[in-house]
Image (cartoon, rainbow, N blue to C red):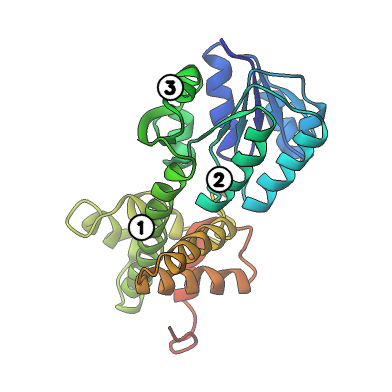
Amino acid sequence: MPSLVFVGVGAIGLPMATRLLAAGHTVTGVDPLPAARERARAAGLATAARYAEAPAADVTVVMVATPEQLAALVDEALAAGVAGGCWVVMSTVGPDAVRAEGARLGAAGVRVVDVPVTGGVARARTGELTLFAAGAPEDLTAVRDVLDPLGTVREVGAGLGDGQAVKVVNQHLCSVHLAAAGEALALAERLGLRPEDVLPLVEGGAAGSWMLSDRGPRMLLGTDVEVTSTVGIFVKDSGLVEAAARASAAETPLLDAARRRFLLAAEAGLTDRDDSRVVETFRAAPGAHHG
C-alpha cells in the first residue's frame, strides 16, 4: 500500500485520512493548526505542522482550502526539493489553479491528478464521497488504492482541470440549493409556520434537495451549531464558480444571487460559522437586504 502524506486534516480531511489509515496506508497528517494536529493524533495519525517536516511518501493527498494555499504548498514542496511520486489534489481550487500548480509540479517530475470530492463530512466519514477524477489514465490507475476507500470514483477526463470544472458545476448547484433552503425556511417563519414542522413535509417531495435535507435541520438550530463546512468556504467556492462563469461567458443569475447571500453572511461576522447560518441573512428585518 502506498505511504501517504495527507495535507489538510480539518473537518472533512480528517475523516478521509482516517479511512485511508484504516485501509492499511501509512498516513502522516499535515496541518498548520495545532488543534487539527491534536485531533489527528487522537485518531491514530502521525502528524507534522508543515509539508517539509513530513516523511517522504509515495503519494501526497491535498485537501487545503484555497488556491492560494495550494500555491503556497507547492512553493514549500519545490523549495524542499520534491521530486517524483504523485500528488492527488482533492481540494476545490478551480481549473486554473490545478493546471498552473500541476505544471509546476510536473516540471519537477511529480505526477498530478485532479480529484475534487463532494458529499460533505457525513459521507467522508462513511467512505461515500463522490470523487471527480481527472488525469492521465495510468496515473489514476496508480492511485486507485488511495481513491477507492474514500468513495465512488467518477473518471471525468484526462486533463488536469477537468475534475475541477465538474466541481465548479457541482458547487454552482450546492450554492444555489443552500441559499434556497435558507430562504424557504425563513419564508416559513414569516408565514407564521414552524420551520421544524414544514421541513419534513417538503424535503421528501418535489421540492426536496440534498442541501435542504442535510443543512435544513442545522438551520433550525442556533449560530453556534457544529461546523462541518463554513460560510467562508461557500464564499470561496461561489467565487470560483463566478470566475469560471465569467471566463466562459456563461450567465449565472441564480448563482450571483446566492453568492450575495454568502457575502452578506460573511459581512455579518459568520465567516467561520457553519454554512447553514446563511439562513440568518433571511431573518433580518424585511427590506434590509436587496438583491
Mark 3 / mark 2, whichever is N-terminal:
2
The one of 208 and 51 positioned closer to us in this rendering: 51
Direction from residue 2 to residue 77 in the image, left or right: right
Left or right position of 20 against 283? right
Q: Could you tell me residue 189's position as x and y percent?
A: 35, 73
Amino acid type of the residue tagged 1 in the rendering: Leu
Kind of residue at badge 3 = Asp
Q: Quadrant of residue 218?
A: bottom left
Report which residue position mark 2 lands on. Answer: 99
Task: Tell me the element at label 1.
Answer: helix
244 relative to 170 in the view: left or right: right
Q: Residue at x 72, y 41 (%)?
A: 73
- Residue annotated with mark 1: 173
CA separation in Å, label 2 and label 1: 23 Å
Q: Nearer the viewer, residue 81 or 275?
A: 81
Q: Residue furthest left?
A: 206
Q: In this orientation, which residue lies closer to the viewer: 36 or 170?
A: 170
